[in-house]
Amino acid sequence: MILFEYNNVFAYFTEAFQEKLGEPSMMTKDEYDAALASIVKTDFYDVMKPKMSGIEVLRWALTYGDKKVYLLLRNEKKSPSWVNQRKLLFIDALCAANNLPRFDFSACKTDVDFLAHSARGVLVCGNANSQDLWDGAGYWRSVWHNDSSSGTIQAIKNATQTYAVQNGLIPEGEIV
């Protein structure tokens, strides 16, 4: 199974945030949370630029391994239900426009909820905090997604290979 995080995989979240609110790395946690709260119930998620390389990786993932994909939504501090609804509408429209099926998701309220999925498969993410949490769980690795679908796909293959060898599913040198 290949799991996908929404932000910076299917949409240019960080770029949209920076354009509207400033550089998140220069904000304290409280300032960042306040900035996020200011975009709730605005058109922020509706006008975000889609990241087509994420769709290319998703399309490939539907043909790889067990052909299962899953979306993880990490709850925002302010109005998580509303934000998750906007994210789901965005990804549903993007999938429909690209002839891809709607796929299952989980809304993760806490880091513990998020990490409960870490034994299920590789995570494709674009958030450093998510990557650190996932990789620290000791199961499957995460894969950082930038604008290169081919780079992300190769990284997924490498992570799958590493997991299979480390867990004795295949002998070293055999290709998954």
Image (cartoon, grey):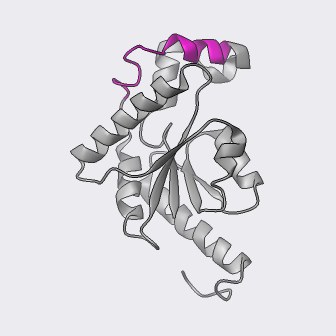
Write the start and end of the magenta stretch as one range.
31-48
Left or right of residue 87, residue 163 in this image: right
**In the image, residue 144 above or below residue 94:** below
From the top left corner, tell me how far across and down residue 50 is, in percent.
Answer: 35, 36
Res 47 visible: yes
Tell me residue 48's x, y (percent). Answer: 38, 27
Write the residue at 44% across / 64% down: 68
Residue 134, percent across and down?
Answer: 69, 51
Q: Is residue 40 magenta?
A: yes
Q: Answer yes or no: is residue 22 visible.
A: no
Tell me if 14 is positioned left or right of 141 in this view: left
Task: Residue 169 in the image: state x and y as whole percent.
Answer: 65, 83
Query: What residue lies at 72% left-to-right and 44% top-to-bottom?
Result: 112
Q: Is residue 138 above or below residue 71?
A: below
88 over 132 or under it: above or below: above
Is-magenta flag for residue 33?
yes
Q: Residue at x 68, y 86 (%)?
A: 172
Residue at 42 percent across and 33 percent down: it is 87
Q: Quadrant of residue 138?
A: bottom right
Q: Nearer the viewer, residue 154 or 71?
A: 71
* Quarter occupied by the C terminus: bottom right
Report the front residue among 122 and 147.
Answer: 122
Question: For residue 140, which quarter of the picture?
Answer: bottom right
